[in-house]
Image: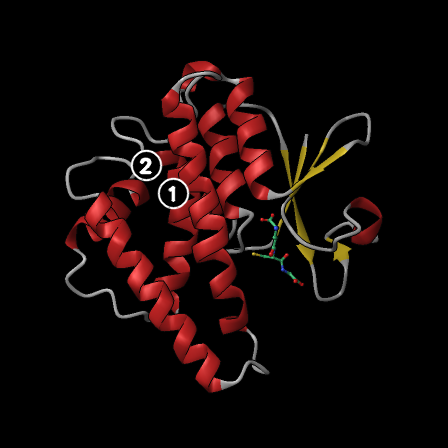
Amino acid sequence: MKLFYKPGACSLSPHIVMLETGLDFTLIKVDTAAGVTEQQENYREINPKGKVPALQFDDGTVLTEGVAIVQYLADLKPDRQLLAPTGTLARYQTLAWLNFISAELHKSFSPLFKEATPDAYKATLRQQLEENFRWVDHELADKQWLSGLHFTVADAYLFTVMRWAKLIKLELSGLTSLEAWFQRAAARPHVAEALESEGLS
Ligand SMILES: N[C@@H](CCC(=O)N[C@@H](CS)C(=O)NCC(=O)O)C(=O)O
């Protein structure tokens, strides 16, 4: 399998999950602005949406959307407990987290990285994000990981967007459970390995 990524982007989440599964894969960097891979392939021929992440199988088939990719990978290696089995409530609790991170966090960051976004809108987004991170902090008060005892695909995704929160200096002071969770996640060898491979450590 080939995983297409851009350093520090949302593709870091499936990258971490891939390493946590122990599966064999090739990591391929994409310049999304230029629309080319590091091997100078036209990236839109691989993923017509032009965004990372994308997972390409040996037969050429491509799976896109981070939340779909991480579920697929986790299900290939159920023994790693990155996602609970189908039919268990625990699985759907983790999927609820994935959806929350995607809809309420990830996509609120995207306009903050664009110069053309009006400042007033950026301020609103920052406020919404800070409110959502306060709620996550509250949820983590008595938990090691988002879904309880096991690091799951949701933790990999939250780690990815939490890095962005730090980069743009969101006001997260006092969110001690969230910060402790972040440090726990950062200390995982596969998280550190993913950061290093992407040139982020
Ligand atoms: N819905 C997609 C969104 C993917 C996405 O927004 N990717 C961003 C990086 S976080 C991207 O490739 N941006 C590059 C660009 O827009 O040129 C997913 O969750 O996988």
Q: Residues within 10 Å of mark 2 (few under 14, many from 20)?
A: few
Judge whether 131 appears above or below 80 on screen: below
Cβ of mark 1 under 8 A from ligand 1: no
Q: Residues within 10 Å of mark 1 (few under 14, many from 20)?
A: some
Image quarter (top left, top right, bottom left or bottom right) of the N terminus: top right
Q: Is residue 91 above or below residue 188?
A: above
* Picture quadrant where residue 54 is located: top right
Q: Are marks 2 and 1 in contact (CB under 8 Å)?
A: yes
The residue that label 1 is drawn on is: 192
Which label was assigned to residue 119? none
Asked whether the viewer can see residue 16, the reply is yes
The residue that disc 2 covers is 188
Q: Is residue 2 left or right of residue 60?
A: left
Q: Is mark 2 within 8 Å of ligand 1?
A: no
- Amino acid carrying label 1: it is Ala
SS label for mark 1: helix
* Ligand 1 quarter of the rendering: bottom right
Colouring rule applied to residues: secondary structure
Q: Secondary structure at mark 2?
A: loop
Residue 167: x %, y % from top left: 38, 67
Foreground: 75 or 4? 75
